[in-house]
Amino acid sequence: MQHNKVLILDFGSQYTQLIARRVRELNILSEIHPFNKIPSNVEDYKAVILSGSPNSVRGEDVLHPDLSKIRGKKPLLAVCYGAQYLAHFSGGEVAPSNTREYGRANLSYVKENDPFFGIISKGSQVWMSHSDTIKTLPTNAVLLASTHDVENAAYKIEGEQTYAIQFHPEVYHSTDGKQLLENFLVNIANLDQDWTPDSFVEETVQDLKDQLKDDKVVLGLSGGVDSSVAAMLLHKAIGKNLYCIFVNNGLLRKNEYQSVLDQYQGMGLNVKGVDASARFLDALAGESDPEKKRKAIGRVFIEVFDDEAHQIEDVKWLAQGTIYPDVIESVSATGGPSATIKSHHNVGGLPDFMKLKIVEPLKALFKDEVRRVGASMHMDKALLGRHPFPGPGLAIRILGDITPEKVRILQEVDAVFIDNLKKWNLYDSVWQAGAILLPVNSVGVMGDERTYEKCVALRAVESTDGMTADWVNLPYDFLQKTSNEIINKVKGVNRVVYDISSKPPATIEWE
């Protein structure tokens, strides 16, 4: 089945992924491509959206898309920079704003009986984020909406299905933003809303059958959501020809290795567990540099995984749980050098000595969509609700060098924290949580004795995809009880702190 798709041209906006997510929430498939790498099969897309940008259409670094196959030929929605680009280069005028237009605003004028705004009325809240503004509309433009400070907040071009807005409908602060996107995509562009988890499963399983036929596939399971959902899709497609390997790197959560193996057994997957914890810890001994730790873990994982894969006769494919943000991040949005990918990301393929073809069943999905696809296959809710856990595991939550004793301490601390989140019914309202072992000792008093022991930091954030995150305001009594329990139960810790940094500027992990 050929879905109607929306092409989103990315000019480097921090909100571009949000546009794609909002479109997909309407059950319409969307894809993000850099503005200067428009797909050759542009005719396969039924509508196009131009994103915002930190650049200015008035500067020397203007980002010029080739719209020759798009404008006037397809429904086109230009957002912020896109709206200013169309105005500036089509007979209008863009000038610096007297004041930077940033934050909430309300529509003070909406053109009546226009399908673009539909049931959205005057007073609707929108989110502005620009330092330029459109002073004069482009040729053949009709004003559709204004705010108190921005006269030309929205317009359309007569004789075309081209619409432009100077606000961001994709952010939640634009209260009718989703309705506006629906008006454009469904009522104007006439797209079908047929992109659903069930349709994704059905089509992906058939595509995997066609692609893989009777070939054998090996998959490295992590116990996380992405690799587990990828495994179930492949299992549906090729059954016993899927060989799953779950490697214990010695840096998993407390008792996680066995509990994950038990969970997979109940799913009918062909899984082999490999305990290589000693091998990983040996490779990490004495190493404090975060990136060198990541590389050491990656190198040993590939060695262990390769040893196991060679025991499977005639394996042809390596399956990976790559998801869409990984793919997007591997391409620079503004046409410069490719963005640096963290060494724990999947994109980028394999070393030469692993001569396997790669299959990535989830590479079109965002994280929340992966969970919905898993739910449509009736996978265990507890597994689908698991917090993300970094590939290098506790190695990047132990600041400094890694020792078996430090791993033990952090596993015990983490277990108390996560178990309490579940007991207090807080786990599902947190996107990711974990503990960090700090490379400092502090003075404490326990009983009548002075102690000089480790300090740990607790971290809990709320997010949708990890691109941005806010710290969670956990109840004081929860933090008090958890801190007391950690200090009383975990030998070697006498101080607990809570991390209240948001991303940006801080990352979710500390390394």
Image (cartoon, helix red, strand yellow):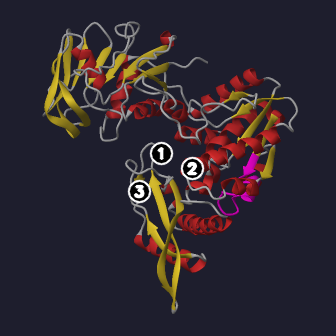
Q: Give how far apart the Cα atoms at labels 3 and 1 are.
A: 12 Å
Q: In this view, does 206 lie above or below 236?
A: above
Disc on the earlier residue, 3 or 2: 2
Asked if the residues shown at circle 1 and circle 2 are in contact, with their CB atoms under 8 angstroms apart, the answer is yes
Question: Residue 315 at x, y = what percent?
Answer: 82, 30
Does the magenta run of residues contain 340? no
Does the magenta run of residues contain 250? yes
Disc on the earlier residue, 3 or 1: 1
**Which residue appears at 18% of the width and 14% of the height?**
92
Which residues, given as a range, are shown in magenta? 246-261
In the visual, does 203 lie left or right of 461?
right
Question: Residue 161 at x, y = what percent?
Answer: 33, 12
Q: Which of 251 and 217 is in front in this view?
A: 251
In the visual, does 28 lie left or right of 2?
left
The label on residue 104 is: none
Residue type at mark 2 is Pro
For mark 3, give the secondary structure: strand
In the displayed orientation, state which residue is furthest to the bottom: 448
Q: In this view, does 244 lie above or below 97?
A: below
Residue named by callout 1: 466
